[in-house]
Image (cartoon, helix red, strand yellow):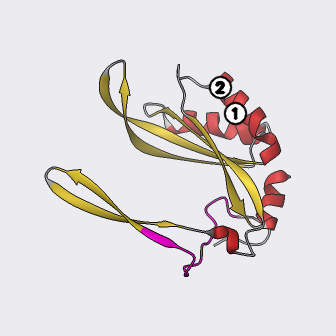
Amino acid sequence: MTSKHSPSSGTFPVSMGPSQESMRLECDRSHHTNYAIGLICNASSDKNMERAVCIVQTTLPGDWLEPIAAEWATSFVRDELASCVQRNLVTSVYQWDGSLESSDEWRIQLKTSINNKEKLVSEIQKRHPFDTPQILAWQAESSAEYASWVEG
């Protein structure tokens, strides 16, 4: 739970209703089929979701100790390029130099204003330890209050 003075850095609430569509995703693993249900949310019809913020995501080496990953991620908030950062360990599976790789990585997700996105992405590229870093960015609808907080 968050207070009005400390906006949530997490996801925004989405109401369930007739504007959502469902889909079934099938994943074949070890001759067993697992089903996952996903929702495509049409949040634009929600009058509470009035403004957009930018979410920028990257990954860091999983063998970095938590304090090192935390310092790297926190530096963007300290330098006022992002309003919020979240980090967690994930397992990534990918092709690299012709072979299938699997490794633990730190997923770093930063929230910033639409106007600040390019500066943030540029600085991530400068500071990133990977030769070919994953840098993804997208706009997310948010409440006007949260967007105002992100914009500073």
User: Does the segment drawn in magenta span residue 141?
Assistant: no
Residue 7, percent from left and from top: 74, 64
Q: Which residue is mark 2?
A: 125
Kind of residue sitting beneath label 1? Val
CB under 8 Å between discs 1 and 2: yes
Q: Which element is circle 2 on?
A: helix
Residue 128 falls in which quadrant of the image?
A: top right
Left or right of residue 23, residue 46 in this image: right
User: Does the segment drawn in magenta span residue 10?
Assistant: yes
Q: Residue furthest bottom?
A: 17
Position of 78 relative to 128 (above/below): below
Residue 117, percent from left and from top: 75, 40
Q: In the image, which disc is placed on residue 121?
A: 1
Where does the magenta region start and end? 8-22
Residue 131, percent from left and from top: 53, 19
Residue at position x 83%, y 52% in the image: 151
Left or right of residue 131, residue 9 in this image: right
Q: Residue furthest left?
A: 31
Residue at position x 54%, y 33% in the image: 134
